[in-house]
Image (cartoon, rainbow, N blue to C red):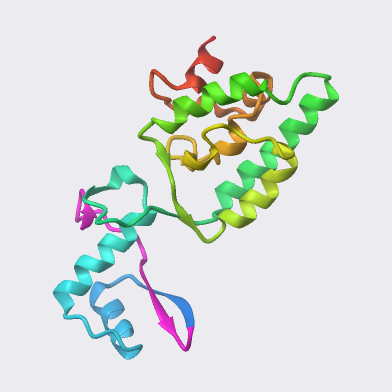
């Protein structure tokens, strides 16, 4: 089970997803006991101690991995579509348009993209995630990838350092990535992004 590294620093509010009348509903409260009571009214039958363990395990699947410890128990991280992600998408669209107008390359070659993908495939920051908003992100990124495919594509997910969907980012040229401003992150030494921004 996953659990918070610092139990004092809890997310506010706490949340727990339950099936309510055939639909998944996110119940929220600032209090564990109040959230437990709400879940009980919707049919939860777990004892309080087991509920607390499951509550933090599920929240840790969505939180930044650095906030939590413990085993995944076969579960995958869950990525939600957030406002910062949408702002990042808009910034990427503006940067792509600007790069095209200036006559600079927006994409790298197939060989370079495959090289980048092989680096990401073996990286601990490559997270294959379940995501309520991922299908939307895939559709939004599709015009940029324009049918381009990678040798290691099935092994790529999202990057836990920058939050980018790797299947699209891997194709981005150095000029485009610099314009987006992805150099604000601390990439691992072997990351191809470090080559782009340090080179």
Relative to residue 114, is residue 95 drawn left or right?
right
Above or below, comparing residue 182 to residue 82 in the picture: above
**Residue 74's spot in the image, x, y percent?**
29, 56
Could you say which quadrant of the image residue 190 lies in? top left
**Residue 176's spot in the image, x, y percent?**
68, 25
Figure quadrant of the N terminus: bottom left
- Give the residue drawn at x 85%, y 25%: 101
Could you say which quadrant of the image residue 153 lies in? top right
Comparing 3 with 76, the one in front is 76
**Residue 160's spot in the image, x, y percent?**
42, 39
Relative to residue 119, is residue 112 drawn left or right?
right
| Residue at the farthest top position | 199
- Give the residue drawn at x 26%, y 53%: 72
**Residue 96's spot in the image, x, y percent?**
74, 32
Residue stretch in magenta: 1-22
Comparing 127 with 58, the one in front is 127
Comparing 186 with 119, the one in front is 119
Comparing 87 with 81, the one in front is 81
- Give the residue drawn at x 48%, y 18%: 194
Instruction: Specify whether residue 5 is painted magenta.
Output: yes
- Give the residue drawn at x 44%, y 46%: 128
Figure quadrant of the C terminus: top right
Instruction: Specify whether residue 15 is painted magenta.
Output: yes
């Amino acid at each position: 089970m996953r659990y918070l590294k610092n139990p004092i620093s809890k997310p506010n509010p706490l949340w727990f997803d339950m099936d309510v009348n055939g639909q998944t509903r996110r119940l929220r409260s600032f209090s564990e006991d109040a959230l437990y009571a709400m879940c009980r009214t919707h049919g939860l039958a777990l004892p309080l101690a087991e509920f607390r363990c499951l509550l933090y395990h599920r929240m840790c699947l969505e939180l930044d991995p650095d906030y939590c410890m413990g085993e995944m128990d076969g579960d995958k991280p869950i990525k939600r579509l957030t406002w910062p992600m949408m702002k990042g998408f808009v910034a990427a669209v503006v940067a792509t348009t600007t790069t095209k107008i200036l006559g600079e390359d927006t994409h790298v070659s197939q060989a370079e993209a495959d090289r980048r993908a092989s680096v990401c495939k073996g990286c601990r920051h490559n997270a294959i995630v379940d995501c309520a908003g991922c299908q939307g992100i895939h559709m939004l990124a599709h015009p940029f990838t324009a049918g381009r495919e990678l040798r290691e594509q099935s092994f790529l997910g999202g990057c836990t350092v920058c939050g980018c969907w790797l299947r699209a980012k891997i194709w981005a040229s150095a000029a485009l990535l610099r314009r987006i401003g992805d150099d604000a992150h601390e990439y691992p030494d072997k990351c191809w992004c470090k080559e782009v921004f340090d080179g």
